Every structure is written in C-alpha cells, then in structure tokens.
Amino acid sequence: MADFKPYSEQKELHADAPFRASMLTYPGNLRKALAEAQADPSKTLMGVAHGIPSTFVTKLIASTKPDFIWIDVEHGMFNRLELHDAIHAAQHHSEGRSMVVVRVPKHDELSLTTALDAGAAGIVIPHCESAQEVKDFIKEMYYGPIGRRSFSPWTFTPGLTTSLYPNDPYNVATSNNHVCIIPQIESVKGIENVEEIASIEGIHAIMFGPGDYMIDAGLDLGKALGGQPEPAFIEAMTKFGTAAAKNNLPIFGGAMTLDMIPQLIQTGSRAIAVQFDVWGFARLMADSLATARGHAKTFEKGANGSANGSANGVPHGQPKPE
C-alpha cells in the first residue's frame, strides 16, 4: 500500500487564501486585497463574472480559484435562495480563495440584504449619480456605528462561529472591516458628479458602465465595440479615470478580451473580470463548432468526385478494392 500522509500535513494541497474570513460563510477581506493591489499593480485581482443562475456553475468557477467571483443580480436571473447558495458555494469550493462581489439592483433591499447576510465581500451599486445616494447606501450596508444594517440571527451559531477580530462574537467587525461598496457610474449625470462621488469617505473602488453610459449620452455603441470610440466617450472615460486616480481609488471592471488587461492595469484597474461565464460558454461552443466544421470542410468532394484525403471514398495510399 502506498504511504499515506494526512491532508493536514500536506500543506502544498492547502488553498492559498490570504483574505478569507475565519468562517467561509463570512466575507473575505476585499478591502485589504484592493488596497494591496492599488499599492502594487502586480497584485491586481483577477476574477470571473457570473451571470448563469446555477450553483453548479458557481462550483465550477470556484474550483479554478479566481481572486473574486462577480455575481450579477441586476441582470442575472438569481432568486434569493440561489444567490445565498451561490455565495456560499463560491467561498467553500474555492476554499476561501475567491471573494464574492455582488451587483444588486439599485433599490432592491432584499437582494442587498441576502448578499450581505450570505457573506458577500463587495457590493456594486449600479446607476449611481450623486454623492448623497452613495452615502445613503453606505448607511444601509454597514452595522453601527458606521450605518444601520440590521443584524441577522441566522448568520452565526453562538459558541461555534468565530471571528478574526477580538470581542466580535457576531462578526460585526468582520463585515464592517471587510465589505466594500463599489459605486458604478453609467450615466451623463453620474460622470458630471464623478469627482464628488469618488471623494466620499468609505467607498473602496469605483466602476464604469460603458454600455449604459453610451446609450444615455446618445453615442454609437458600434463604434466603441469596433475600436473607434467617439471623442465624447473618451472624454467621459478620462474624467472617470482622473477622479479615481485623484482619490487613490482602485477601478473595478471587466476585460472584453485578455489583450486589454495590460492597458486596464495601466489606467487604474485593480480588480478585473477576465472571463464572463455566459460569453465564455457561448464562445467555447461557437469556436469548437466552427473549428470542427472547418475540419469537415476539408473532406468536401470536388467536381471530379474526389475529396481531400480520399478518392471515391478510399483514403490515399490504400489500394482500391477490385
């Protein structure tokens, strides 16, 4: 029989999870991870955007151990239980390596409460247009003395759950020290107020929504997707990036292609979704089918009835049957 060595003694098998909480049902320290990435761009967080409402898919993503999994509830079809279970699945199946960021619909208190109670480490608030509304969301997201978040009796077990912080039996300090609020700017009005929004004490990253911004501004999405954005769009992006840099704020976002990543890091991105599950799955299928059909095309018969690699159904190099 092969020599047996207990898992506890094989440290090389243990997940490297420097930002996990003491319990995998509590939020990882996204705030510290973003701060380290902001100070050292080589530590930029690489994640996956998750829009397919399936905990099976969540587990597959988490098994690859991205730095974060961005669950989109604004446009993804997650119900409350699916969201709760997806957050837990992400953290357990990544062994604490993957922190969860959730984009909730702007005024959906139920999604916000569910995400926070389940252990989300970051909340993206879409369509932010003023500093005051961001301040109001801060009050909803944090426990006192920062805010007025309600404490759930179902997120801990007295005497069993623990905290990384002293005198924190209910993990209130864990949430108040780890959870990040990420305002998303995606309108003309939001860009007008982006400097004021970026200067708010208590936000930890900022996100731009190019699609909604271009629609709101009446710009041509096709030109931007084709690599020829209009000057007004470039101006908005510049104003957004300048506000983030001025306030030492990391930029949170996604890469349409992997080739974009160096430029995104250079312009201030410190948490980048490098793959989107819906797009990735669709592209994988489309590319595989296109390649397979290309291979099949090589066997297309020519005018003389022969095909590439065979003649009259007989592979080249083999004798023709009598």
Image: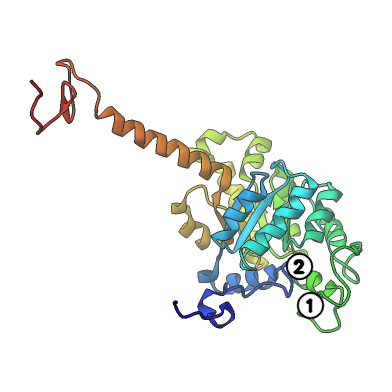
Label 1: which secondary element: loop
**Nearer to us in this view, 116 or 14:** 14
Residue at screen point 65% across, 47% down: 209
Residue at screen point 47% across, 38% down: 285
Q: Is residue 234 left or right of residue 117?
A: left
Q: Is residue 265 left or right of residue 30?
A: left
What's the coloring here?
A: rainbow
- In the rendered image, residue 265, in percent from the top left (x then y), is placed at 52, 62
Locate the C terminus by quadrant: top left
Tally the marks: 2
Q: Is residue 126 left or right of residue 70?
A: right
Q: Say which quarter of the image contains residue 183.
A: bottom right
**Nearer to us in this view, 288 or 3:** 3
| Residue wearing tag 2 | 26
- In the rendered image, residue 304, in percent from the top left (x then y), is placed at 14, 16
Above or below residue 295? Residue 207 is below
| Residue wearing tag 1 | 163
Residue at screen point 91% across, 64% down: 153
Q: Is residue 205 left or right of residue 254?
A: right
* Residue 99 visible in the displayed image: no
Q: Earlier in the sequence, mark 1 or mark 2?
A: 2
- In the rendered image, residue 67, in percent from the top left (x then y), is placed at 59, 64
